[in-house]
Image (cartoon, rainbow, N blue to C red):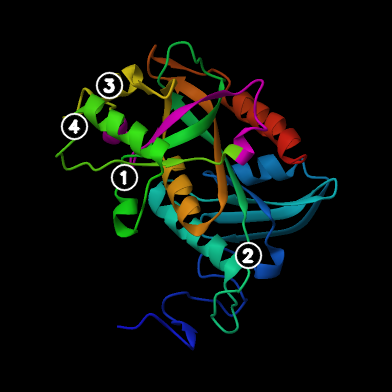
Amino acid sequence: MERFNSQGIGHSELLITAKGTTYHLPVKPEQLAETIITVGDPERVPMISRYFDKISFKSQHREFVCHGGYIGKKYLLVLSTGIGPDNIDIVLTELDALANINFDTKQINPQHRTLSIIRLGTCGGLQPDVPTGSLITSSFAIGMDNLMLYYVNDYNTDERFVLDSFMQHTRLTDKPVEPYIAEGSIVLRKHFGAGYTNGITVTTPGFYGPQGRVTRAQLRYPYLTDAFTSFSSRDLRILNYEMETAALYALGKLLGHLCLSISTVINNRANDTVSQQIEMDIDNMIRNSLQIIAEI
């Protein structure tokens, strides 16, 4: 079945609403910003936009809440993605469509538009010396989900080296789980130095079993959390667990966008602690990161 021809992308391949938005994201092409902040929780969107000098618009569809506005002269979008790599597939694909596909003709625009997409999220820490409240920038993200099995995905030299080392260390070779890896944007990460700890992030498709949490169900890989904590490569350690970053990085790379994930540690798995001031930790991440993002 032909999916793309001289008439453009098929109508059922990219759905456009009567309002001129993509099927899921409540954003029109003219509302798109060059810099987009993504968060998982829809309620975190106003936590960020309250620091804007001016809010231009607000919109919502399902779990996708979007506020557009300005800090000084810099126009930004903040958008909630919901939880998990499957939602990142939707968000990244539709943001790219807003940037690089003509909605009237369904043709790909001749000039590629590169977006800067910065995730501000929460995570579980995996190192005892990275306590709750710490801010982590993800240099690499290793995906334990299956999203990238559906895309043609190549690795650079550093990605291949880290992934091969990871597979050997975790004994996941020839197992049903097929991890993938992607590197975040060095261009964006270089702006986040003092106050941020840089390392590797593991992205999982679930919060409990996939992150080694034991409640009542028996785990197939009970050793993995300890294996992640003891892994290092390229002088980087695995610092945290979360549920979106690897998908963000891998799809962003395929589509030609700059992506960076910043997380605040709300619980530490290595020493079994939970932050007693989660909302303050999140607000600290937002305020510190916005100050930098506004200047990029």
Q: Please report the bounds of the magenta region as a residue range.
A: 187-211
**Can residue 214 be seen by looking at this rendering?**
no
Q: Amino acid at mark 3?
A: Ala
Residue 48 vertical placement versus 237 (above, below): below
Q: Earlier in the sequence, mark 2 or mark 4?
A: 2
C-alpha gap between disc 2 and disc 4: 41 Å
Asked if residue 170 lies left or right of residue 262, the reply is: left
C-alpha gap between disc 1 and disc 2: 28 Å
Is there a contact, CB below 8 Å, between mark 4 and mark 1?
no
Q: Position of residue 60 (x, y in %)?
A: 60, 60
Looking at the rendered structure, the secondary structure element under dot 3 is helix
Q: Looking at the image, is mark 1 or mark 2 nearer the viewer?
A: 1
C-alpha gap between disc 4 and disc 1: 19 Å
Q: Which mark is residue 124?
A: none
Say few, some or many: other residues with alpha carbon within 10 Å of mark 1 (under 14 / 14 to 19 / 20 or more).
many
C-alpha gap between disc 3 and disc 1: 17 Å
Q: Earlier in the sequence, mark 1 or mark 2?
A: 2
Q: Looking at the image, is mark 2 or mark 4 nearer the viewer?
A: 2
Looking at the rendered structure, the secondary structure element under dot 2 is loop
Q: Amino acid at mark 2?
A: Val
Q: Looking at the image, is mark 3 or mark 4 nearer the viewer?
A: 3
**Quarter of the figure with residue 216:** top left
Q: Which residue is mark 2?
A: 27
Q: Position of residue 42 (x, y in %)?
A: 56, 47
Is there a contact, CB below 8 Å, between mark 3 and mark 1?
no
Q: Which residue is mark 4?
A: 217
Q: Work out whether residue 235 or residue 180 is closer to the camera in this orientation and state it.
A: 235
